[in-house]
Amino acid sequence: MQENLVIVESPAKAKTIEKFLGKDFLVKSSFGHIRDLSKKNLGIDIEHNFKPEYVISDDKKKVVAELKKLVKEAKLVWLASDEDREGEAIAWHLAEVLQLNDAQTRRIVFNEITKDAILNAIKKPRNIDLNLVNAQQARRILDRLVGFELSPILWKKIKPALSAGRVQSVAVRLLVEREREINAFQSVSYFKVTALFEVKDPKGSAETFPAELSVRFQSAEETRKFLEKCKNAAFRITEVTTKPSRKSPPPPFTTSTLQQEASRKLGFSVSQTMTLAQKLYEAGKITYMRTDSVNLSDLALNVSKKVIASEFGAEYSQPRQYKTKTKGAQEAHEAIRPTYIEKETITGSTAEKKLYDLIRKRTLASQMSDALIEKTTAVIEAPGIDEHFIATGEVIKFDGFLKVYRESEDEEGEEKKGNFLPPLRQNQDALLQSVNAVQKFTYHPPRYTEASLVKKLEELGIGRPSTYAPTISTIQQRGYVVKEDRPGKPRDYMVISLSKNKITEQIKTEITGAEKAKLFPTDIGMIVNDFLVQNFQDILDYNFTATVEKEFDLIAEGQLEWTKMIRKFYSSFHKKVEETLTSKEKSKGERLLGTDPETGKPVFVKIGRFGPMVQIGDANDGKPRFASLLKGQSMDSVTLEDALAMFRFPRKLGTYMKSEVTVGIGRFGPYILHDKKFYSLNRNTDNPLTVTLERAIEIIEEKKQKDQNKLIKEFPEKPGLRILNGRYGPYIAFNNENYRIPKTKNPAELTLDECIAIIGNKEKTPRKTVRRKKS
């Protein structure tokens, strides 16, 4: 008989813990949740106080059978799942399914997987916290009720196979509102004026420095007048102010801030960050990765102090404890930190090492001295000129925590640094070298990245550390949101300059509006959002969603009964569902764009069976005509002109090598047709409405060159049989089938007889099946 059976959620965690416990302990994994709400019907008995119907999933039946057998052979069963609501629920489900009694069951929790933490947990077992379990059950049941009842409405009112979720739909709403804010934004131009001045030190040496004008001009005419005034003006430094300042380090990582910084600094998606953090935690390298606490243990504070003093010097150490400010922060965990802060590097993948390094540097920085900075501001004026120039600069007197870590910001390019300023004196002459006035344009609010969306959800009190990653993954999987790069567009701008008392003007071109890894709501995402906002205002209300989160917290604290909370929500929600279902109104997101001047028929943009489309005419006017929207077009912003252009395909571009070149749009997107052959357009860079003959020829020749490089060998006596270079290596192509070439053969030296022999063996290359995601 085994003395002790320890059950954890993951095999990796089991493997790490097993190293710390003696031969009297057997550590096994449940592989996450062993049961969930039944997928048949609702899985909740509403009539009997919302009693959940849990079932063991098919893929866990073998695991459960093994655990039941081991439980019978053990004296004590230690449930060691994570120390949060989800982990507590896993422990409770295990106890229920394995029929564990209180006498043989011990619940243990720990914030890090180290020998000391595990052994201390063994010394301090506790009972399963049913309040935490009920908070998890309440979230799961409420989300099932919302999804189960809203989804059929979307099928009936919009189109089949759609789904809705409580937190996910609110996240989509944030993106839709931002997109519409961007579409409605009217950019305004202005002129930013900067100057280069020269000063001389007491020894006569000249140094230059930049300064910016205190005002911005709205027109080129105003700008020219100002530059005229600057000709022969005698500028002087009228004021110099030097102020010392301090910059304090950011607190150690929470789940949210780790996701944000890993996105900004490392380019990781939110789900990628959480997967890597989970691996680091289970390998015993960092503390628990789902937390909204910024506290560090006394042990961590002491070790950090020693490491900082050793690596940088005692003057860099400044121990401090931070207070958690997040709304409704739950479970008193530590912040995310290395378990062994003294370890500068770890074993693992490159991505794991990068994330560990980020966590370690942030932890150390939080315990380091403030950076001491000296900021200098100088005012430069000239008689007869009302406006003045301001030069600013900063000098780092003591780098403190900046020696290790600089926090990133959303929408920034390079890290912001102050200008260098030479020593400046009040009443010192400043010789004007040049003035540059550059036309700028106000920019719309930035689209959300995964990181900035997490930040916004946290600010609103929506979701918790465990929900951010799955929420963002879900809205993308459902097709309501896409994460992608989009190219910018060229834009002309004016530069007016003054140099050597001569004013010159130039028109330059810049690429503007390029987006990288941004979240864009899709047309179907916008239609679903509009329908839900119109009919289920409460569910989509930010304050309501945040209030629900607070109620989950109250359940976790034992201050609210979960069934009362669910009943209060469900009574009004279900009534609204029934009202909406009986309504005859359907939402197709249809928008009338205008009238087709050729036929006089109405032109609509709407959601069709295969996505957003333009339609000329309707069923009452005879057979309507349809065209799909192009990549980058949206139902919200497409114009009548854009829509009518979709019906001008195929577009004739001209002639190349005695054959006509046309551009069209097919089932798989826009294409070029030349000499009965098709060539795909690049969806990101080529617009079928504007692509030129020259660009089409480039595409044709690029494809021909690629095809030539693909061909290794062909046989005139056997047309159609070719040896080609493929994605997975060389192969034989014949009669629309592909055949592997044995590794012992040189493809270029194969004879026709050898090829036929290989074909005769029917060793066909496996075709990779592409599984389409369900919408």
Image (spheres, grey):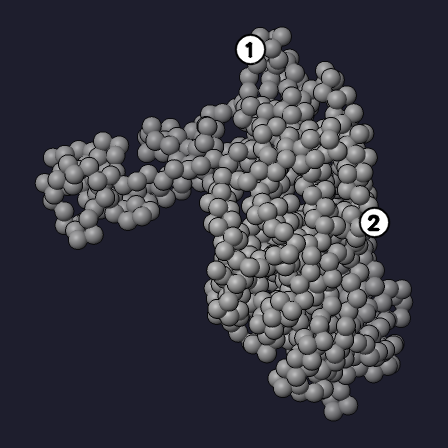
Which of these two is toward me, 57 or 74? 74
> Can I make out residue 60 in this image?
yes
Q: What quarter of the picture does the C terminus occupy?
A: top right
Residue 35 % position (x, y): 58, 42
Q: Please state which of the two labelled residues, at mark 1 or mark 2, is closer to the viewer.
A: 2
Which of these two is toward me, 627 or 696? 627
Q: Which residue is mark 1?
A: 623
Q: Which residue is mark 2?
A: 559
> Dot 1 lies on which element?
loop
Residue 166 % position (x, y): 71, 38
- Identify which residue is drawn at 56% across, 76% down: 343
* 1 or 2: tag closer to the N-terminus: 2
User: Which of the 4 quarters of the picture holds residue 437?
Assistant: bottom right
Q: Check the image and report above or below for 443 versus 83.
A: above
User: Which of the 4 quarters of the picture holds residue 304?
Assistant: bottom right
Which of these two is toward me, 326 or 138? 138
User: Which of the 4 quarters of the picture holds residue 647?
Assistant: top right
For badge 2, the amino acid type reads Gln
> Dot 2 lies on which element?
loop
- Identify which residue is drawn at 86% across, 64% down: 387
For badge 1, the amino acid type reads Lys
Q: Is residue 642 left or right of residue 547?
A: left
- Identify which residue is drawn at 58% across, 8% down: 622
